[in-house]
């Protein structure tokens, strides 16, 4: 008979966070229980409570991201999409936690608040630095474009968007990035 495998505390904590991100993203904040997350990892629910105290604390930790957006101060408007899109693709395609938060934000007030916090703390300052004026409006408009694109391509999986290469998609959105951050406001 083989002795059960021992996990290290950091590995167990990381496994719990990974399982929580998956659960919150697929099930939504309101329907996830700490017991389910524990079951996904194969640990006692008390272990989840030990590390995270409450479901809200678990969610807060699972929804913590550093998007690593570049400094856009001094980036020429023509180059905005070329600078930003590789970073967004890296987040969208390389961090299941972000997509889980994006999915959950559509149906959960708590997830929506975390997404807004992420936008206000990381996306807004980066985009506002490149805005020629009215940074709040310009950054918010471009942020809505970016979130909409991520939602349509990676959550809804709109076929033409999924089929586009990264380069093609970047070329299509480049004029939009430029307009939102540096173009004249258009009033109809």
Image: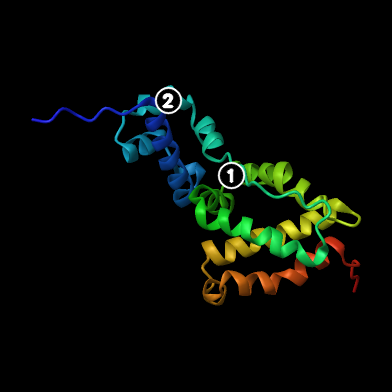
Residue, disc 1: 111
**On the rendered structure, is 187 left or right of 40?**
right
Residue 63, image x, y percentages: 56, 41
Residue 39, image x, y percentages: 32, 37
Residue 83, image x, y percentages: 70, 59
- Towards the viewer: 169 or 72: 72
**On the rendered structure, is 157 left or right of 79?**
left
Whichever of callouts 2 and 1 sits on the residue coming sooner in the sequence is 2
Estimate how packed mark 2 is, as few (under 14), some (14 to 19) or many (20 or more) residues with alpha carbons within 10 Å: some
Task: Indicate whether 77 appears above or below 134.
Answer: below
- Res 36 quadrant in image: top left
**How far apart, in angstroms, are the residues tagged by discs 2 and 1?**
20 Å
How many numbered discs? 2
The residue shown at (78%, 59%) is: 141
- The numbered disc on residue 70 is none
The quarter of the picture where the N terminus appears is top left
- Towards the viewer: 85 or 65: 85
- The numbered disc on residue 49 is 2
Residue 45, image x, y percentages: 35, 29
């Amino acid at each position: 008979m083989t002795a059960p495998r021992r996990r290290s505390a950091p590995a167990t904590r990381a496994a719990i966070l990974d399982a929580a991100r998956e659960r919150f993203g697929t099930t939504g904040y309101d329907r996830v229980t700490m017991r389910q997350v524990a079951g996904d990892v194969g640990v006692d629910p008390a272990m989840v409570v030990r590390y995270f105290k409450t479901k809200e604390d678990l969610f807060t930790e699972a929804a913590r991201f550093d998007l690593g957006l570049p400094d856009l101060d001094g980036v020429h408007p023509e180059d905005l999409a070329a600078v930003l899109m590789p970073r967004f693709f890296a987040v969208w395609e390389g961090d299941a936690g972000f997509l889980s938060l994006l999915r959950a934000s559509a149906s959960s007030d708590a997830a929506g608040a975390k997404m807004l916090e992420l936008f206000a703390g990381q996306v807004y300052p980066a985009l506002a630095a490149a805005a020629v004026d009215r940074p709040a409006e310009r950054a918010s408009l471009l942020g809505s474009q970016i979130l909409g694109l991520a939602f349509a391509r990676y959550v809804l999986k709109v076929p033409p968007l999924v089929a586009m290469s990264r380069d093609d998609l970047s070329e299509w959105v480049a004029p939009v990035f430029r307009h939102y951050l540096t173009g004249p406001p258009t009033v109809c």
